[in-house]
Image (tube, grey):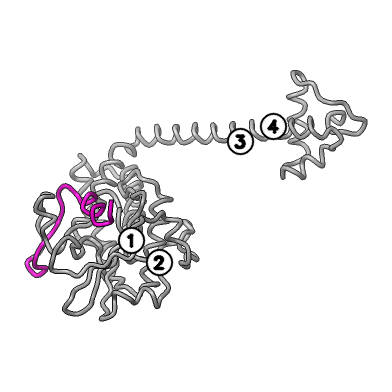
Amino acid sequence: MNILETYQERLPWHGYATDNLKAGLRVYALADLVKKQFVQHNPKHSICWLCYDIDSETASADWIDQEAPIPNIIILNPGNGHAHIHYGLETPVHNYFKASDKAKRYMSAIDIALTYKLDADPGYSKLISKNPLNDRWQVVIPRNELYTLDTLAKGLDLTGLVDRRRKIEAFGLGRNETVFHAVRKWAYTERRKSQQYFNLEMFKEAVKWRALAVNAEFSAPLPHDEIRHITKSIASWTWKNLSPEGFKTWQKRKSEAGNRVKSEKSARLKAEIIKAIEQCPELSQKDIADMYGVTQKTVSVTLRQAKENYTFPISDRGAVNAV
């Protein structure tokens, strides 16, 4: 399958499109969507394409001089040379509420780094782009093979961008991350502590206004439809799961999950300690403690608990005899 076939296959069943940007956007079914000059290139809850707006007369070749990754699709305006550049992801990244935060953060970091690398417009909303299936545009296909995030990240400077403890820059896909995390944290607290919301619709309205306030701080705000999707996801999940009763249940599940992780980690450590003694009976408890980065007391307790039902090699100076 060539890249344009992949592009058409990945278009949303219903998406925004237009033949005239000044006339605004409308939602079209796929059969009509593919004919439009400007289309929504990603489905509602997935990022299949990372897209960049290059306002340069030499946009088709600038990526070479900037030593950027090879684009999959370059869609040129023959009148001025400006282009939209697409990088296709082998595995789309889901961006709905319960999707992996780690994957979304990694993708956003790559998106920001590519924006810098390509000297692309940081205010581009990424909702719609030139349609490579429309004859109005000149289309160049430098690469047919799709990218993994790791492959795309090679050669990009992601310093500080993938650290989840740091606030990601608020442009490109980073705006989605900024709005999402700022609003969800507010919504969690508001749902637990406030008694003024009688139903989900009231709460959803409050979350919407919070999201609009955060979005208004950007020099290039996200489209209203994007804010609506973020609001709906956050409000619905928070209303259901973080009521006073739901919050207690959530805390209990989180605590149980944490205890399971600790128990499994402890079991693996004990197994490793026992294996080390079995293979090297001359090791002292201090040697084993240093090997695994634990205290000598931890090693001693582990051996004492295991000694009743495990036969160890005997050593004159080893860890077992020191129990």
Residue lying farthest top? 309
- Which amino acid, mark 1? Tyr
Q: Which residue lies under the disc numbered 1?
A: 87
**112 to 287, vertically: above or below:** below
Marks 2 and 1: CB-CB under 8 Å?
Answer: yes
Spatial CA span between label 4 and label 3: 9 Å
Instruction: Give the residue at x 27% y 79%.
Output: 56
Which mark is first along the chain, 3 or 1?
Answer: 1
Residue 151, image x, y percentages: 45, 58
Q: In terms of depth relative to the viewer, which is nearer, 84 or 74?
A: 74
Considering only order in the chain, which callout, 1 or 4, is on the residue closer to the N terminus?
A: 1
Tell whether 218 sits left or right of 199: right
Kind of element beneath mark 2: loop
Q: The residue tagged with tag 1: helix, strand or loop?
A: strand
Q: Mark 4 against mark 1, which lies toward the viewer?
A: 1
Answer few, some or many: residues within 10 Å of disc 3's Cα (few below 14, many 20 plus, some between 14 and 19).
Answer: few
Give the residue at mark 4. Answer: 270
Type of residue at label 2? Pro
Q: Which residues are magenta?
A: 1-23
For the residues bearing labels 4 and 3, Cβ distance under 8 angstroms: no
Q: Nearer the viewer, residue 319 or 75?
A: 75
In the image, which disc is placed on residue 69?
2
User: On the image, numbered disc 3 is attached to which residue?
Assistant: 265
Q: Of residues 182 and 278, which is closer to you in this image?
A: 278
Q: Is residue 304 magenta?
A: no
